[in-house]
Image (cartoon, rainbow, N blue to C red):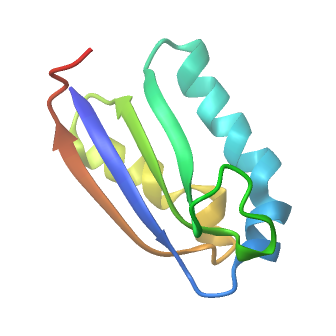
Amino acid sequence: MLYAIIATDAADSLPQRLAARPQHLARLQQLQDAGRLVLAGPHPAVDSLDPGAAGFSGSLIVAEFDALASAQAWADSDPYVAAGVYAQVLVKPFKQVFP
């Protein structure tokens, strides 16, 4: 089943985000390589593809897991969580309708 991982960044966490980004992306690449990643990306804090110093307000990941508990465990072990980038992470079942 698909799950949406909806994360909200902590205030002023851009330096931590940048430092943990390689490890975060490596985990996403593993999902991609396994054919389980639908989409992933950050929410710019301003209306721009390159928010610069404004940074990001959070992230969205939609991926396949065998159960909600597995998706939650994966989200809980994200390098952004360990680095203090994410202030809150919500994991919810997701039903893809389009495309």
Q: Nearer the viewer, residue 47 or 2?
A: 47
Residue 29 percent across, percent down from the top left:
66, 27
Choose top left, top right, bottom left or bottom right for residue 84: bottom right
Residue that appears at 28% across and 54% down? 91
Residue that appears at 21% across and 26% down? 1
Residue found at the far front of this picture: 47
Residue 3 percent across, percent down from the top left:
27, 39
Residue that appears at 22% across and 36% down? 67
Horizontal side of residue 19 vs 47, given as left or right: right
Horizontal side of residue 46 vs 55, given as left or right: left
Q: Nearer the viewer, residue 88 or 47?
A: 47
Figure check: 31 above or below 58: above
Residue 47 percent across, percent down from the top left:
57, 61
Horizontal side of residue 32 vs 19, given as left or right: left
Residue that appears at 71% across and 75% down? 54
Residue 89 percent across, percent down from the top left:
39, 66
